[in-house]
């Protein structure tokens, strides 16, 4: 059985859990990191030298990096509906998965640490204001894309791209800040909320 190492509160672990639910994959999960077993232990570092969750063990195969993991799961467990093999369709999905990691995540990291985690290392009000504006800008890009598709991130159907993007949208609505009106993002959030797996691992009270 697939084993997932990582605490269920981690947004990156939740990507993997959500993907497993959508794909019907049975799994076992072990708590690692932040209050649980230390990711700095030799046992964990042997699996992931970055000391980060999640890590999966699929029999003798070990993999880390959440976006790599969900792509692997879709390919290994008959997830063609979420991650079609057609090159152009798959490239469009990969584009938005990579955008979430490279553009959207950095935009919210300072604001989230300051306003939700209340981390004392993020006290700069001017940086919070600037980061909020940057985050809003990225969300406006997403809003424009959702206006174009009138459905999901990569087109008319739910795909693998909606897992990382959907969790970021949940974080957007869970952070106490002044948000611009983005109707397509709001409609998308409600559309995702019709999926039981999103309610279990996305819109579940955790930011």
Image (cartoon, helix red, strand yellow):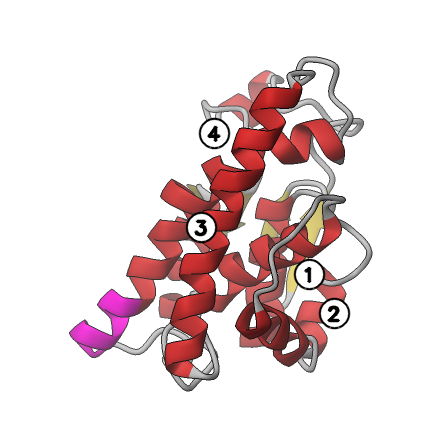
The part of the image, by quadrant, that contains residue 159 is bottom left
x 67%, y 72%: residue: 197
Q: CA distance from mark 1 to mark 3?
A: 20 Å
Label pair 3/2, CB-CB below 8 angstroms? no
Q: Is residue 116 visible?
A: yes
Answer whether labels 4 and 2 touch (C-beta < 8 Å): no
Crowding at dot 3, Cα within 10 Å, few <14 / some 14-19 / many 20+, comes out as some
In this rendering, would 166 be left or right of 176?
left
Q: Which residue is under mark 1?
A: 202
Please say if the residues under marks 2 and 1 sit with CB atoms less than 8 Å apart. Answer: yes
Disc nearer the start of the sequence (4/2): 4
Q: Residues within 10 Å of mark 1 (few under 14, many from 20)?
A: many
CA neighbours of label 4 inside 10 A, class few (<14), some (14 to 19), many (20+): many
- Occupied quadrant, residue 160: bottom left
Q: Which residue matches tag 2?
A: 199
* Labels 1, 3: front one: 3
Q: Which mark is residue 138?
A: 3
97, above or below 26, in the image: above
The segment highlighted magenta reads: 86-92
Q: Which residue is mark 4?
A: 48
**Is 152 or 90 nearer to us in this picture?**
152
């Amino acid at each position: 059985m697939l084993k997932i190492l990582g605490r269920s509160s981690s947004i990156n672990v939740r990507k993997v859990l959500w993907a497993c639910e959508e794909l019907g994959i049975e799994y076992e999960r072990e708590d690692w990191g932040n209050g649980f077993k230390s990711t700095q232990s030799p046992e964990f570092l042997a699996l992931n030298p970055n000391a980060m969750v999640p890590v999966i063990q699929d029999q003798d195969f070990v993999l880390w990096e959440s976006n790599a993991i969900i792509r692997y799961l879709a390919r290994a467990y008959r997830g063609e509906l979420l991650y079609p093999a057609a090159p152009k369709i798959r490239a469009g999905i990969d584009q938005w998965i990579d955008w979430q990691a490279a553009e959207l995540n950095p935009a919210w990291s300072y604001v989230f640490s300051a306003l939700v985690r209340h981390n004392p290392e993020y006290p700069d009000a001017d940086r919070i204001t600037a980061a909020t504006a940057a985050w809003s800008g990225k969300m406006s890009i997403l809003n424009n894309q959702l206006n174009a598709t009138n459905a999901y991130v990569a087109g008319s159907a739910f795909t693998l791209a909606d897992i990382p993007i959907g969790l970021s949208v949940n974080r957007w609505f869970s952070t106490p800040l002044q948000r611009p009106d983005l109707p397509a993002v709001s409609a998308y959030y409600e559309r995702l909320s019709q999926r039981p797996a999103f309610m279990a691992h996305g819109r579940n009270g955790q930011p």
